[in-house]
Image: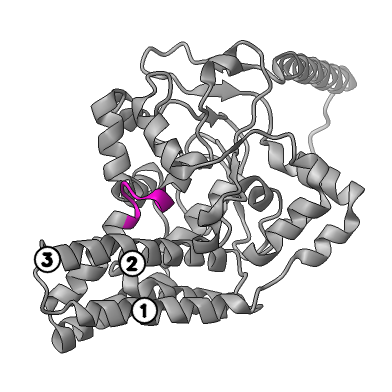
Amino acid sequence: MAVIPSSVSTRSAETAALFRRLKSRQNLLDSKDRTANRGSYYRSDAAIDKFLWTYDEEPHRSRRHAIIRAHPEVTKLCGPEPLTKYLVLAVVALQIYCAYQLRDAAILSWPFLLTAYVVGATANQNLFLAIHEISHNLAFRSPLANRLFAVVANLPIGIPYSAAFRPYHLTHHKSLGVDGLDTDIPTALEAMFLDSLLGKAFFCTFQILFYALRPMMVYKLSLTRIHLFNIAAQVVFDALLVRLAGPRALAYLIVSSFLAGSLHPCAGHFIAEHYLFKPGEVLSGAPVQETYSYYGPLNALTYNVGLHNEHHDFPAIPWTRLPTLNAMANEFYVDLPHHTSWTWVLWQFIWDKDVGLWCRVKRRKGGRLVGGGKVEGGKESDPDAEVVG
């Protein structure tokens, strides 16, 4: 066996110690840099990037912990809501009934379009948000039961999406604003090309298509059995509907889904939830929040999704108990700016020259990837885990 001279061994130990000291010093400098920048929001130096960037962590985790310390009883609100499954089945039945009744109506006729906008779009937006609720395992205790029931809620939407929505949405929660992970944020390409009144009007009219296609452009999910089941179930349902009621019945469901994510009052929640409507104040050093709630009457049709700060603070609390959370911990919510009208949100987003797709807060690091997607960086998280404390 070769013997290493003691002088070489000593020099190696000194080198290793020096390396550790330098690394420790660099970590300290990095920590000071982050601390100095904490609370700051800035524009990127890149000419094509006008998003608001921050070094801060997302605000919901710290507020959740503060609420639990002040009101430990809020954790008792977590868990499934049995009422959800009955409401979903009722809305699914309503949409199938309307589709059958309109089987002979011309697609461009007033009865068809008016029913699709007033009833169909509202009903399918309700189902979008039922799937959102079910994605958090809030209809049943069993994760598998929730996955399968989401496919049932998906049927009147006409296009399979519930299986793919879940991991993308849970990643949005665990990676709020994180570049390359949060697919709720418009891409720079969208923001650049739609940075005008007409561009924003186009975005609001076709926003359902942007929300459907954007995630796949950011990162791709691995195909699983539940994805295949979602696709197969939807194809069978659509084929049966066309065979028994004709193609116009299916067209009613598709048009309803399109209108649900277009210029419809309930569609205002897509923009109301995380867009900043006074970006200038953020850059001037004013306090900023990244999530906005809405406490108006349309919550009755949309599973209380308007209580969005409350939802992000406690994603394991179902829609029926979010108002209770707000009442229990009201001191944490009462002073937060909030929206009073989703219709006004759409109007202001389109017409206000200072508001647009760039008005989102982004982070360069952090977050967790949920559901086996393929993306650079980020940690993969248990898709069935919900943070309570």
Task: Judge from the rendering whether residue 376 lies leftward or rightward of residue 92; answer left or right.
Answer: right
Asked if the residue under mark 1 is in contact with the one under mark 3, i.e. CB atoms within 8 Å, the reply is no
x, y percentage for residue 134?
55, 68
**Considering only vertical position in the picture, is 31 above or below 270?**
above
x, y percentage for residue 366?
63, 37
> Which quarter of the figure has residue 38?
top right
- Which residue, given by chain and number where applicable, does mark 3 sit on? 107
**Does 327 appear in magenta?**
no
Task: Judge from the rendering whether residue 87 lies leftward or rightward of residue 122; answer left or right.
Answer: right
Mark closest to the chain's N terminus, 3 or 1: 1
Residue type marked 1: Leu
How packed is label 2: few (under 14 Cα within 10 Å), some, or many (20 or more)?
some
Asked if the residue under mark 1 is in contact with the one under mark 2, i.e. CB atoms within 8 Å, the reply is yes
Looking at the image, how many numbered discs can be counted on the residues? 3
- Direction bottom: furthest residue: 244
**Considering only vertical position in the picture, is 214 above or below 318?**
above
**Considering only vertical position in the picture, is 102 above or below 309?**
below
The residues colored magenta run 260-267
- Which residue, given by chain and number where applicable, does mark 1 sit on? 94
Task: Judge from the rendering whether residue 296 lies leftward or rightward of residue 74; answer left or right.
Answer: left
The numbered dot on residue 1 is none
Mark closest to the chain's N terminus, 3 or 2: 3
- Which residue, given by chain and number where applicable, does mark 2 sit on? 119
- Secondary structure under tag 2 reads helix
Between the C-alphas of marks 3 and 2, the distance is 15 Å
Residue at point 81% right, 20% down?
24
- Secondary structure under tag 3 reads loop
Residue 101 in view: yes
Between the C-alphas of marks 2 and 1, the distance is 9 Å
